[in-house]
Image (spheres, grey):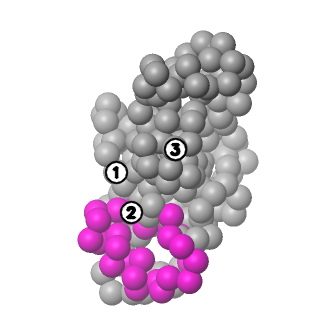
């Protein structure tokens, strides 16, 4: 099935259409970013989406097979990817270059909600964060203990996450990803 996006391009993917997701409360789509889109992938994790990022050197066919096996949407900028058998059903080829432009393209073309569940996942390894156990809070540096808001930990890699000026900047950038008004004005 094809659907025209804001630029009038037709995408082959059934995920290319936005309104269904824009109006529902939950979005459990999962993504797989190729190595060129690793930065975008980390931002999808920050927004709350289950997102795998491929290691360098994997073959395109393996990526398509992983996307199919795990029910993920493969994100790439490589047009040749969709020439692989059955890739069209699982692949969205992005046309933008930098992270911000790719993020806004995902908003427009796939209805990605950048405020889905921010800062709920480890951006390093994609694992869902958990609250730090009270006993462990006492072992944290005083400057982190003094902050308001929860301290979370990644149960897989142990990275700690807390609220602060950096998370306010992150939330502002996520909000900007969802604002496609600038693109529409320039098109
Ligand atoms: Zn982690």
Sequence-earlier tag: 2 or 1: 1
Marks 2 and 1 close (CB-CB < 8 Å): yes
Q: Is mark 1 within 8 Å of ligand 1?
A: no
Q: Which residues are magenta?
A: 53-78
User: Crowding near pointer 1: few (<14 within 10 Å), some, many (20+)?
Assistant: some
The residue located at (53%, 79%) in the rendering is: 79
How far separated are the C-alphas under marks 2 and 1? Answer: 8 Å
Q: Residue at x 44, y 55 (%)?
A: 51
Label whose residue precedes the other's in the sequence (3 or 2):
2
Residue 73 — which label? Answer: 2
| 129 on left or right of 37 | left
User: How far is the residue under mark 3 from the one under mark 2?
Assistant: 28 Å
Q: How many marks?
A: 3
Quarter occupied by the N terminus: bottom left
Residue 56 lies in quadrant: bottom right
Q: Position of residue 136 (x, y in %)?
A: 50, 26
Quarter of the rendering containing residue 11: bottom left
Q: Per the image, is 80 magenta?
A: no
Q: Which residue is mark 3?
A: 158
On the image, which quarter does residue 96 sit in? bottom right
């Amino acid at each position: 099935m094809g659907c025209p996006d804001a630029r009038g391009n037709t995408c082959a993917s059934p995920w290319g259409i936005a309104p269904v997701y824009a109006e529902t409360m939950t979005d459990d789509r999962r993504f797989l970013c190729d190595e060129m889109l690793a930065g975008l992938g980390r931002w999808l994790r920050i927004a709350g989406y289950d997102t795998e990022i491929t290691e360098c050197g994997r073959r395109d066919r393996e990526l398509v097979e992983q996307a199919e096996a795990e029910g993920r949407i493969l994100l790439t900028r490589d047009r040749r990817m969709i020439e692989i058998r059955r890739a069209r059903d699982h692949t969205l080829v992005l046309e933008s270059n930098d992270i911000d432009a790719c993020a806004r393209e995902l908003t427009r073309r796939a209805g990605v909600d950048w405020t889905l569940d921010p800062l709920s996942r480890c951006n390093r390894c994609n694992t869902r964060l958990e609250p730090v156990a009270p006993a462990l809070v006492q072992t944290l540096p005083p400057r982190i203990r003094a902050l308001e808001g929860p301290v979370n930990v990644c149960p897989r890699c142990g990275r700690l996450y807390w609220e602060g000026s950096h998370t306010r900047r992150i939330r502002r950038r996520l909000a900007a990803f969802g604002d496609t008004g600038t693109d529409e004005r320039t098109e």
